[in-house]
Structures are given as C-alpha cells and as structure tokens.
Amino acid sequence: MGIRHRAREIAMQALFYMDICKDDRNDQLELFCSNINIPKKSLAFFKKIVNGVLNANSEIDRIIELYSSNWKIHRMSCVDRNILRIAVYELIYCSDIPAKVIINEAIEVGKKFGTEDSGSFINGVLDTINKKKAEINIDSSLKQIKEK
C-alpha cells in the first residue's frame, strides 16, 4: 500500500470520527491521532489533507452538493461524504496530483470502507466535478490555500 493511499485512508477515518462527533476542533484531531498509529511517511500528507478539508469544508461541501445530482451533503453516508471531501480538496487544491489518481484512490477507499454502491456513487460525483472543475468558483478567502 502506498504512502499517500494509507494517508487518505487514515484521513477519511479522522474526518469520519470528527463528523460523527460533530466536532472538528484540533483537540478531537489530536485525540484521534493519539489512538491511531499513523506511519511516519504518511503523516505529512495526512495532515495536509485533513487540515485542508477542515479549512475549506464549507466550500468543499458546496461543490459536492452542486454536482451530486439531488443529494444533500447531510443525506450522504458519512464514509462517502468524507471520501468525497478529501477527493474534492485534492482536485481543487492539489494541482500536483493527477485527477485520475485522485478519483481512483477515492473509489478504492470507498470500496474498502463504504457500501456496495459507494464506488460508483463516488466515481459519478467526482467525474462530474472533474469535468466542471474549470467552471468552479472558489471562495476568494480560500484561494490562498490553493496557491500554497
């Protein structure tokens, strides 16, 4: 298993935990990290993903809802919702990662942790977002994240 793949899996679990607790404060993330063995090689990418998603969460959720055909973010399964958040963060803010890799990774994590239909649902939403990426207006306060 690759370093980034493992970081994505653990990031999804951390975001899932904070989502279920309805608490995205740093102390919840620290509590999660103190109970999970995060490989040292995966730690930097894990932190980048989780902090990026948390910092841009409302913008990411807006994008997901806009392109998920009649699905409100709160109606999605917690696993699918957080996999999509990670992938959308990467699609929008991580230009060094090819979209195909991001989408394939999200599908694989969805198949592992989600339901029987998670892979196809995640693929459909992300494929649409990727095709419309040039049309997506990013909140000006979040453009700084993209430029880093």
Image (cartoon, rainbow, N blue to C red):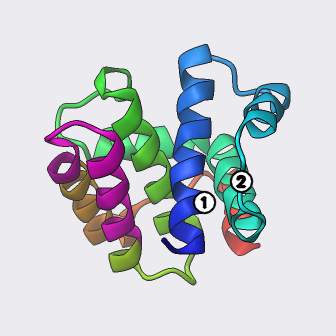
Three-letter residue code for mark 1: Ala
Give 134 or 27, whichever is nearer the viewer.
27
Q: In this orientation, does residue 137 appear?
A: no
The residue at which mark 2 appears reads as 38
The residue at which mark 1 appears reads as 7
Q: Quick check: is 137 in the magenta stretch?
A: no
Whether 31 is drawn above or below 88: the answer is: above
Q: Quick check: is 113 in the magenta stretch?
A: yes
Per the rendered image, the range of residues in magenta is 102-121
> In the picture provided, is 44 more to the left or to the right than 104?
right
Q: Quadrant of the C terminus?
A: bottom right
- Point out residue 95 in the picture as x, y percentages from the top left corner: 55, 79
Q: Main secondary structure of the magenta part?
A: helix
Report the residue at 64% width, 56% height from top. 49
Report the residue at 55% width, 39% height from top. 13
Report the residue at 22% width, 36% height from top. 115
Q: Residues within 10 Å of mark 2 (few under 14, many from 20)?
A: some
- Point out residue 94 in the picture as x, y percentages from the top left corner: 58, 72
Task: Nearest to the eye among marks 1 and 2: give it.
Answer: 2
Q: Residues within 10 Å of mark 1 (few under 14, many from 20)?
A: many
- Point out residue 91 in the picture as x, y percentages from the top left corner: 46, 67
